[in-house]
Image (cartoon, rainbow, N blue to C red):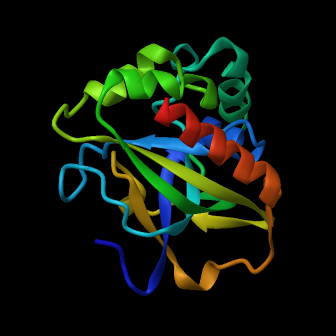
Amino acid sequence: MLDTGAIPALKEWASAIQALENGRQIMVMRKGGIVEETKHFELKSPAFYLYPTYEHQRKELIKSSDQSYVEESLAEWAPEASTVRITSYAEVTQDLEIRDQEMLDRLLEYHMWTADFAESRLKWKKKDPLHVLILRVYRLQEPMEIPVLPEYNGCRSWISIPNGLVPREMTPVLNVADFADQVQKINETLRM
């Protein structure tokens, strides 16, 4: 459960956060972490910070055209650092529950992950849907440096950031029209 006196953050690969911040994609895929309280993904907040993780991202899980995101994020990673830099905030505009391979395949051009990796996410915990979160992403004008706390470790989707660390100024990655256009294309692709 999230701490009500804190602000939620979704843990995501640093490379995926870079792709979101560059407008390359507007989605993340979720099944739930191994140590989730409920053993499956739950959307615990419609808006949250994006907390970068580095441990599990690998170039071979990313399309060749997007592998530079992994290289760049790993180059800036300091495994023993006592702080982590938060650079973006997101609002969920849709939570799409994907249950079959055909629907997942339709989304391939809209994200950075390989078809094989996306398929492995769908097949893991087969009874649970794959949550594809459509995100309106904002870049923080002043990144936050937050302490790396022991409770942030482990394969879980959600963490709580102390309430006093909230920045005030953010800029949307995509303007309203470009974001709406991408959302419309994704929804039309899924209706085919």
Whether residue 82 is visible to the viewer of this picture, yes or no, is no
Residue drawn at point x = 49 percent, y = 56 percent: 94
Quadrant location of the N terminus?
bottom left
- Residue 55 screen position, x and y as percent: 48, 34
Answer with left or right where residue 69 lies relative to residue 3: right
Identity of the residue drawn at 48% across and 36% down: 191
Q: Residue furthest front?
A: 192
Image x and y of residue 58, in percent: 53, 22
Q: Is residue 4 left or right of residue 163?
A: left
- Residue closer to the observer: 174 or 191: 191
Pick the residue in front: 79 or 167. Answer: 167
Q: Nearer the viewer, residue 157 or 128?
A: 128
Tag count in the figure? Answer: 0
Residue 109 quadrant: top right
Residue 62 versus residue 129 in the image, above or below = above
Q: Is residue 102 above or below residue 46?
A: above
Query: Which residue corresponds to the image point at 52% horizontal and 17% vertical from the top-left?
Result: 114
- 113 in relation to 33, above or below: above
Q: Is residue 129 left or right of residue 152?
A: left
Q: Is residue 47 visible?
A: yes
Q: In this rendering, is residue 108 above or below 79?
A: above
Place of residue 125 in the rendered image (x, y in percent of width and height, measured from the top left): 20, 34
Name the quadrant containing residue 69: top right
Q: Position of residue 12 (x, y in %)?
A: 51, 46
Q: Quadrant of residue 146?
A: bottom right
**What residue appears at the point 63 percent right and 79 percent down from the top-left corner?**
165
